[in-house]
Image: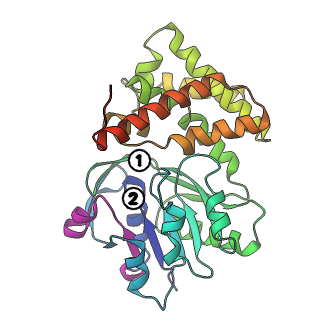
Amino acid sequence: MAPRILFFGTGAVGAGYLWILSRKVPAENLVAVCRSNFDAASQHGFRMNSTLWGEFTYRPAVVRSVDEAAALDPLYPFDYVIIASKAIPSSPSTAQLIRPAIAKGTSIVLFQNGIAIEEEYSKLYPKNPVLSTVVYFPATQTSPAVINHTELETLLIGTYPADAPAWHAEAARNLVQLVIDCGATAKHHDDVQPQRWSKLLINASLNPICALSRSRDLQFLESGHEAQEVMRDLMAEIVAVAQAYGYSNLSQASVDNGIERVKNRKPPGVEPSMQTDAQAGRNMEVDAILGNLLRLAREKGVNVPILRTTYAYLKALDASFTRSRQGGNFS
């Protein structure tokens, strides 16, 4: 029997995996909560422009709220609730907003960036599987419900915590197999946190640097003599925090590899999501990516002066976007 799945958030990543799963999951079993792109998605569907799968339009069931989704068929609860919205603080929080869709046995799947983001879900829903993921799906929503995607797609899934009950791990493996059956790439990890730290090494360095400098990663690296050293030192601080928590998969070699990846980009380089958000005046995932990392560093007594400075500047920039939307004064 096909699972019943709710997507909370249908930006580029959410809309992409919504289509992937629609290849095997019946339309009546897939529901998407849309917010800013609801009108476009409900009227015209989603437009996917992918160098991997081609160009096409698809029309899933879309709703405005989790309450509306839960009321569609209250006799059949959701097997998976996939959180594909950005990890940005809100009141009520995303973990609270999804409550109407959470039933006994519902797995909560976090398609979100950052580190140490799982705890709130685990505390609010202690009997439900919380599945943490690392998503490599470079895509951009260029206009409401229009998604541009390049050829990379990989989904790594594991339970939170790693020693969760066996049936939680089974839920993770079942989702992995479903993604594979849909023609995409997925892998189960007994402990997915090392993979989260590996992605964080890039997200917590390149994202803020590019957002603050308004430069793509290669443009920043080539901007002056100090740029490479700043990038290298920030990455080294991230590695130090990871190692303090026992994640030895990150090392000086990881830093060297990260720098080389940027050097080998085709000019002008990659525009990370934070830079895209900053240039559009949108709030960024500052705390999920940098704030939590800084908190973890303090808890272990790891000295991270560059990370602390970067966080302070990025937090202030993010606050300026909020003031702008509220009609605040910049002076």
Please say whether residue 207 is visible from this viewpoint.
no
Q: Is residue 71 left or right of residue 115?
A: left
Of the numbered discs 2 and 1, the one sitting upstream in the chain is 2
Query: Residue 297: percent from the left, percent from the top?
Result: 71, 35
Q: Which of 243/305 is in front?
A: 305
Determine which of the numbered discs, if any, sits on residue 330 in the image: none
Query: Residue 193: percent from the left, percent from the top?
Result: 69, 50
- The residue beneath circle 1 is 151
Q: Amino acid at mark 2?
A: Gly
Is there CB contact under 8 Å for labels 2 and 1? no
Query: Residue 92: percent from the left, percent from the top?
Result: 48, 62
**The image quarter in which residue 307 lies:** top right
* Magenta region, residue range: 27-46
Please say whether residue 244 is visible from this viewpoint.
yes
Query: Residue 138: percent from the left, percent from the top?
Result: 42, 45
> For residue 35: magenta?
yes
Which residue occupies 56% across, 21% down?
A: 231
Q: Is residue 192 left or right of residue 99?
A: right
Q: Residue furthest left?
A: 43
- The residue beneath circle 2 is 16
Q: Which of 10/127 is in front?
A: 127
Which element is circle 1 on? loop
Which residue occupies 76% across, 41% down?
A: 247
**The image quarter in which residue 42 lies:** bottom left
